[in-house]
Amino acid sequence: MQRRAGVFHAQDSRSRLVQRLPSSLMVLSMIVIPRRFPARVNIPNRSFWFADERRQLIIESLLRYGLSIALIVQRFILAIHGLMIQANQAGPLTLDSIGFTIAL
């Protein structure tokens, strides 16, 4: 892969940060907030779900859902990033509209 000035490549550290930061923050928030700040979790009947006998179940469920959403967001960011690299490497700068639509 040839390097051009001003073009992000997959091996750039800034690129890796942009790719991983949103999903990492999402997972971290899904781990920390329900455990330490259950009053901050916005679910119906919070007192029912965070009762002692269901607390661990709801924390595990929120973590599972959070990981699923983080995975979807991570794949979306990677797809858009790949399209941006392709657009920057193309002769006239163009974004692949079909790839973008598929990524959405």
Image (cartoon, rainbow, N blue to C red):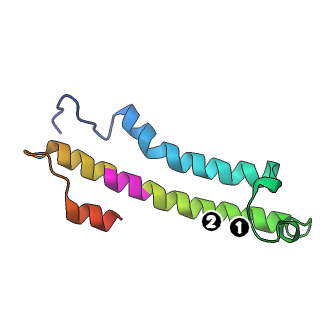
Q: Residues within 10 Å of mark 1 (few under 14, many from 20)?
A: few
Prevailing SS of the magenta stretch: helix
Q: Secondary structure at mark 2?
A: helix
Is the residue 8 above or below the residue 56 in the image? above
Whole-percent x, y for residue 18 in the image: 43, 41
Q: Tell me the amino acid under the disc marked 1.
A: Ser
Q: Tell me the amino acid under the disc marked 2.
A: Tyr
Q: Which residues are magenta?
A: 75-80
Q: Secondary structure at mark 1?
A: helix
Residue that badge 2 annotates: 65
Residue that badge 1 annotates: 61
Residue 76: say if magenta.
yes
Pick out the residue farthest to the left: 91
Give the residue at x 27% y 61%: 100
Whole-percent x, y for residue 1 in the image: 18, 39
| 72 displayed left or right of 66 | left
Whole-percent x, y for residue 73 in the image: 47, 57
Give the residue at x 41% y 58%: 75
* Contact flag, marks 1 and 2 (Cβ < 8 Å): yes
Q: Quadrant of the C terminus?
A: bottom left
| 28 displayed left or right of 60 | left
**Alpha-carbon span between mark 1 and mark 2:** 6 Å
Is the residue 53 above or below the residue 66 in the image? below
